[in-house]
């Protein structure tokens, strides 16, 4: 196993309770989890199993009700809104099921967004670079509506990696895509994980996708019920990023 | 997130809803242009009124006799017949010409004036030659009443432009013979129009005759001490600063001449005071207009707030995305406040231009008959309106922006 210094995520007995009217609903109960740098982990489980809550906590969008969360050895479980925003900006790249691109902005401007809220040196060059990384170097000035679903998600990936985060969090990244585009997205994530040693956490329903990661965490009723290595990990070949087959005619 | 980025974002999002942005802008445009043009009109009216009063002559004091009464019933101020031509002469000789530049007594009666088949009833004002300079009259043709006319009680007259128009149309009346109160008068001059109608119309609707002629030939008034009575003595002071002193010294002199110990039988009106009073009145008028216009500006501001609230709700998801990507509260706040301020300041700038356009359109347009409105556009009001409209954007934009900045990113991302 890796050394402790390479621990990216260290979650200890984390619980999250929501108040719904007068009833207190536990969304996450006593979750303990550690993820090393360079791992590619999937979180699976039925709806309502607490996956999203876990993602929100991991992504610093939410703070746990109890327990401790160290992100890169920094305790983020008690931080205020502004410090959490800074952490999200500098350390976490989000990829969403619905891409969540701003429709009025071009691919380039969308990728630029995280840079607006932090340091923004050489922003344009960096954005073009990360769009090239996902094979969209030719489409920097397209608006989301002019791109296919797979391409939009690739813009989403470019936006997630533009700040060179320590952690990529992907929430059902292939949920809205056909199998072809879906494979393409997973292949890119695998490639980023392997080549750049980026830590990737994917929430997914799809066991195919889960089998492409090296570790599967299963959840049910707000608890982690299983955490196991993937025996026969599937490797997807990156498609040389030709967007032609995807979108033309 | 710096200002230029915020501005670019604001323009992109305002551009997305062009029609809506334009309508919101319109609210501010109407408000600002209303403020600017109404203030300019108010300013113009004030200038017009002041300049009209000054067209009577400048630095004037008006001395009028006090009230008379009959069987203890007052006939009102100015009805007494205590002021005489000799008083005027005495004033002229007692003070140096560097202190009092002119003394012009006048007495007024109303008579029928007839030329051929035309006739009109008008004010016949008995004057002295000084009247021309003191009351600031110029002649269209002919000459003014001279000292010779005074001495000889000559039956000569100078016509006001309106009277001349009534009797003679466009012909030059000089040299013609008219009948005033049944007596023949030779017309020697025609006055230039003072260019006013309405309440000031009397300046053109009058006939000037020598004051001695008026007394001996036209009027039946006699003073108690036998002199020629006058109704007003116009006194022109050299220096406006000396007005107070002049009032003092003239009062003292007339009291001596009339042997008055207690109650004055005359009053002195200061023209400057009249102007000041009128200015105060018109100031209230200007402020009143401005206040009404400000209400429309306020309504425009509320329009901005309304549309920003709609915009925040519509863009909840965008706010969630931005927050997930690392936008802090202050970034979101800044973005929406910038958007509101761009709307209001943009509206302010267009409003100033539209207001300026109205002002230029109205400038020189007749308002009181043949008087034209001189609009007084002031850059101060323009700058003030711009500042106020920017302030409105900030004020009415801050609440929606605060709401946006306080959204929880998780809820915002889930929002459809």
Image (spheres, coloured by chain):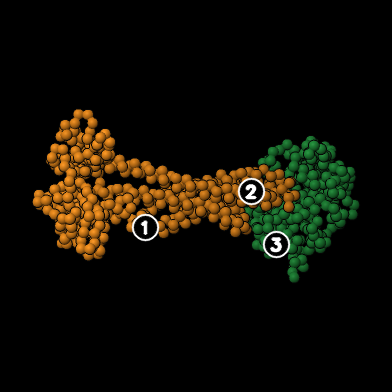
Chain colours: A green, B orange
The residue labelled by disc 3 is: A145
Q: In the image, what residue occupies the spot 86% across and 56% down?
A: A208
| Residue placed most toward the observer, B54 or B181 | B181
Where residue A97 appears, x then y in whole percent?
A: 77, 54
In this image, B253 relative to A37: left or right? left
Question: What distance separates the C-alpha of mark 3 from that of mark 1?
Answer: 59 Å
Query: Which numbered disc, 2 or 1, marks the residue closer to the eye?
Result: 1
Q: Callout 3: helix, strand or loop?
A: helix
The residue labelled by disc 2 is: B309
Query: Which numbered disc, 3 or 1, marks the residue closer to the eye?
Result: 1
Check contact, mark 3 vs mark 1: CB within 8 A. Answer: no
Residue A195 appearing in the image: no
Earlier in the chain: of badge 2 and badge 1, it is 2
Where residue A198 appears, x then y in whole percent?
A: 76, 50
Residue B57 shows which numbered tag? none
In this rendering, do the residues under marks 2 and 3 share a single chain? no
Q: Callout 1: helix, strand or loop?
A: strand
| Residue placed most toward the observer, B93 or B179 | B179
Q: Count the marks.
A: 3
In this image, B148 relative to B7: left or right? left
């Amino acid at each position: 196993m890796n050394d402790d210094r390479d621990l990216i995520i260290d979650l200890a007995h984390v619980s999250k309770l929501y108040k719904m009217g007068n009833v207190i609903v536990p969304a996450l109960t006593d979750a303990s989890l550690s993820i090393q740098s360079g791992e590619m982990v999937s979180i699976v489980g039925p709806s309502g199993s607490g996956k999203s809550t876990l993602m929100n906590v991991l992504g610093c969008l939410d703070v746990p009700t109890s327990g401790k969360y160290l992100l890169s050895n920094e305790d983020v479980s008690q931080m205020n809104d502004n410090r959490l925003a800074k952490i999200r900006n500098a350390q976490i790249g989000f990829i969403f099921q619905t891409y969540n691109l701003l429709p009025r902005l071009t691919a380039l401007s969308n990728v630029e967004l995280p840079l607006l809220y932090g340091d923004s040196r050489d922003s344009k060059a960096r954005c073009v670079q990360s769009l090239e990384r996902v094979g969209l170097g030719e489409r920097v000035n397209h608006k989301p509506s002019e791109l296919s679903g797979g391409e939009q998600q690739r813009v989403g990936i470019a936006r997630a990696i533009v700040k060179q985060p320590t952690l990529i969090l992907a929430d059902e990244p292939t949920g809205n895509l056909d199998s072809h585009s879906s494979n393409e997205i997973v292949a890119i994530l695998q490639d980023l994980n392997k080549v750049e040693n980026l830590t990737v956490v994917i929430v997914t329903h799809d066991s195919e996708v889960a089998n492409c990661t090296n570790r599967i965490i299963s959840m049910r009723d707000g608890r982690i019920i299983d955490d196991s290595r993937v025996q026969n990990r599937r490797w997807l070949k990156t498609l040389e990023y030709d967007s032609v087959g995807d979108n033309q005619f | 997130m710096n200002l230029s980025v915020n501005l670019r974002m604001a323009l992109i999002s305002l551009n997305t809803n062009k029609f809506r942005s334009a309508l919101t802008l319109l609210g501010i445009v109407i408000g600002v242009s209303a403020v600017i043009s109404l203030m300019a009109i108010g300013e113009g009216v004030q200038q017009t009124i002041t300049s009209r009063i000054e067209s009577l002559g400048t630095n004037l004091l008006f001395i009028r006799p006090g009230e008379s009464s009959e069987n203890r019933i007052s006939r009102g101020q100015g009805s007494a017949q205590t002021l005489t031509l000799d008083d005027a002469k005495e004033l002229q000789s007692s003070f140096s010409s560097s202190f009092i530049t002119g003394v012009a007594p006048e007495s007024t009666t109303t008579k029928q004036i007839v030329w051929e088949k035309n006739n009109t009833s008008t004010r016949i004002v008995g004057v002295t030659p000084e009247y021309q300079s003191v009351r600031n009259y110029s002649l269209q043709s002919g000459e003014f009443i001279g000292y010779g006319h005074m001495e000889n009680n000559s039956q000569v007259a100078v016509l006001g432009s309106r009277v001349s128009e009534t009797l003679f149309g466009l012909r030059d009346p000089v040299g013609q013979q008219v009948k005033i109160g049944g007596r023949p008068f030779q017309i020697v001059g025609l006055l230039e129009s003072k260019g006013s109608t309405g309440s000031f119309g009397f300046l053109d609707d009058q006939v000037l005759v020598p004051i001695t002629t008026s007394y001996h030939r036209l009027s039946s008034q006699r003073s108690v001490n036998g002199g020629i009575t006058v109704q007003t003595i116009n006194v022109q002071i050299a220096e406006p600063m000396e007005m107070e002193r002049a009032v003092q010294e003239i009062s003292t002199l007339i009291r001596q001449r009339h042997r008055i110990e207690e109650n004055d039988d005359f009053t002195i009106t200061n023209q400057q005071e009249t102007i000041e009073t009128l200015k105060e009145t018109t100031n209230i008028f200007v402020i009143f207009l401005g206040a009404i216009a400000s209400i429309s500006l306020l309504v425009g501001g509320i329009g901005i707030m309304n549309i920003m609230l709609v915009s925040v709700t519509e863009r909840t998801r965008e706010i969630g995305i931005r927050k997930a990507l690392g936008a802090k509260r202050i970034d979101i706040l800044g973005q929406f406040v910038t958007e509101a301020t761009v709307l209001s300041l943009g509206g302010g700038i267009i409003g100033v231009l539209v207001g300026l356009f109205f002002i230029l359109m109205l400038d020189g347009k007749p308002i009181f008959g043949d008087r034209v409105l001189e609009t007084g556009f002031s850059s101060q009001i323009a700058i003030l309106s711009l500042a106020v409209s920017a302030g409105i954007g900030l004020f009415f934009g801050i609440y929606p922006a605060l709401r946006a900045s306080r959204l929880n990113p998780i809820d915002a991302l889930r929002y459809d």
